[in-house]
Amino acid sequence: MTDEKSALSVPPSVQGVDRNLDTSSHSAAIDVRNLNFYYGDLQVLFDVSLKVPERSVTALIGPSGCGKSTFLRTLNRMNDLIDGTRCTGECFVESQNIMDPDVDVVLLRKHVGMVFQKSTPFPKSIFDNVAYGPRVAGERNRAVLADLVESCLRKAALWDEVSDRLHTSAMALSGGQQQRLCIARTLATQPKIILMDEPASALDPASTDRIENLIGELCASYTIVIVTHNMQQASRVSHQTAFFFKGRLVEVGPTMKIFTSPGEKRTEDYITGRFG
Amino acid sequence: MTIHFVREMDALHRSILSMCSAVEELIHDSVDGFRAGREGLSAELAARDEEIDALDNRISEDCLKILALYHPVANDLRRVAVVMRIGAELERVADLAVNIAERSAGIISCGSFPLPERLAQMSREALSMLHDSIDSYVEQNAELARDVCLRDEQVDALNSELIQEVVSVVKQEPKLIEAGLHLFSVIRHVERVADHATNIAEDVVYMVEGAVIRHQQISG
């Protein structure tokens, strides 16, 4: 199966998100405390505190410019790459405050991977895309790399579609396949946490469905934080939803509660489309 | 929120209000007809019940259309879900109105039966509960809805007492057994009207507060 259309049927192993998962007993994979973030003099996050339960999906929602993507990027310090930014507060990942200047950000990003809105395959073969991270980390054993590439492509539900053309260009894949390749590439560095910034916003419904099913599969082993503008997507894939507005975390709670009876009027007004 | 969605919700609201009025009128006519011993009422009520059935179907379809096209959430979702449920409850009340008229005709055909004095009180209370449950929906008044739920116990108690009375009469006058069975059904139907009013009130609490109070004890 090489084309997207023939890959639409969902394998029996794909269960999707477990809607009954109770994350209240999960320990926090990420524990953000009193986070403030500034672009120069402009403050864009105000005193945000949020716990992300491990092995679950947390959706960040809110209108454009509310700070949700900025918040997401602080979780693996991607904002460090932007000149003039600074932040205060604490963000604990596995008991380590990643805001500490001594933190090795390369190692941090290995543990906290990221998938972007636009798929960003390297202009290399499918195999080399997935093997890129492990090679940078020093892995040279071909057999180990081959096993890892297969394992990650299987986890990303892409193996069956590309196993016969691993050494062809990744750029020839469809948009949905490229995004799953990027997820496989992220998995190859063996992260504990995966950040997703609108991972399906540029995809057609079938490809979006596959990405959402994949999120449901991956959250059994990984902690996932996803930014999405699609309310239905947030309600479909996440266990916990956090609503941001004007740089503040207005409300966070179980997704079922947020989408049936939110506690804050601003949350209700946003998710029912009355503003934003 | 699109203007189309607002229009659809307004139209849905108007439809359920029409159904509320039609069903209230039907059950009042049925109970009044029973009290007055009016003959030939059931056919007329059955014809009106068919119109209510059609209205129920239309409301269900409109709710499904809104769910499919607009994916409402939060208070909008609760309102659509509750309108669907209220439609189903009202449709059952309309059926009961026809059932009461049929049983009334049965009693008349058997001659007569001494009506328990407190049947009028029970009917008044059940119809008042229905009226208040509808008001609580219109006014989005969870307090009034909770009050309706609490009043159901009183109707249940009257139901048991009246049935005991009917059983006593039939024991003393076995020839009244057929009329007694019809009356027994009328009492049960009136009690069911109160149950449906309670269900509507419970749904209103969910719509307003997001709290599920069905199958739970409410303290007064």
Image (spheres, grey):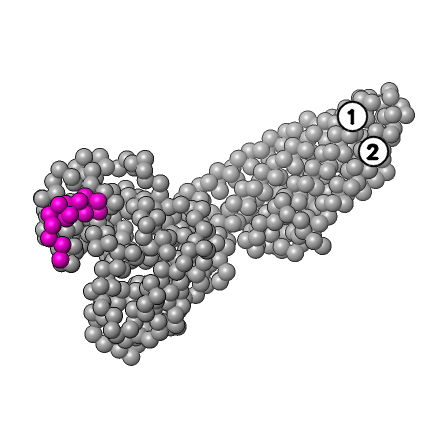
Image: magenta residue range? A138-153
- Residue nearer the viewer, A250 or A18: A18
Q: In the rendered image, which residue does mark 2 sit on?
A: B164
Label number found at residue B181 = 1
Q: Where is residue A8 in the image (x, y as percent from the top left)?
A: 26, 37
What kind of residue is marked 1?
Answer: Leu
- Residue A266 appears in the figure: yes
- Residue nearer the viewer, A137 or B195: A137
Crowd tier of the residue under label 2, counting other residues whose Cα lies within 10 Å: few below 14, some 14–19, many 20 or above: few
Instruction: State the separation of the CA atoms marked 2 and 1.
Output: 12 Å
Name the residue at 65% across, 32% down: B95
Q: Position of residue B66 (x, y in %)?
A: 45, 44
- Quadrant of the image for the N terminus of chain B? bottom left
User: Is A69 located above or below residue A181 in the figure?
Assistant: below
A268 in the magenta segment: no
- Quadrant of the image for the C terminus of chain B? bottom right
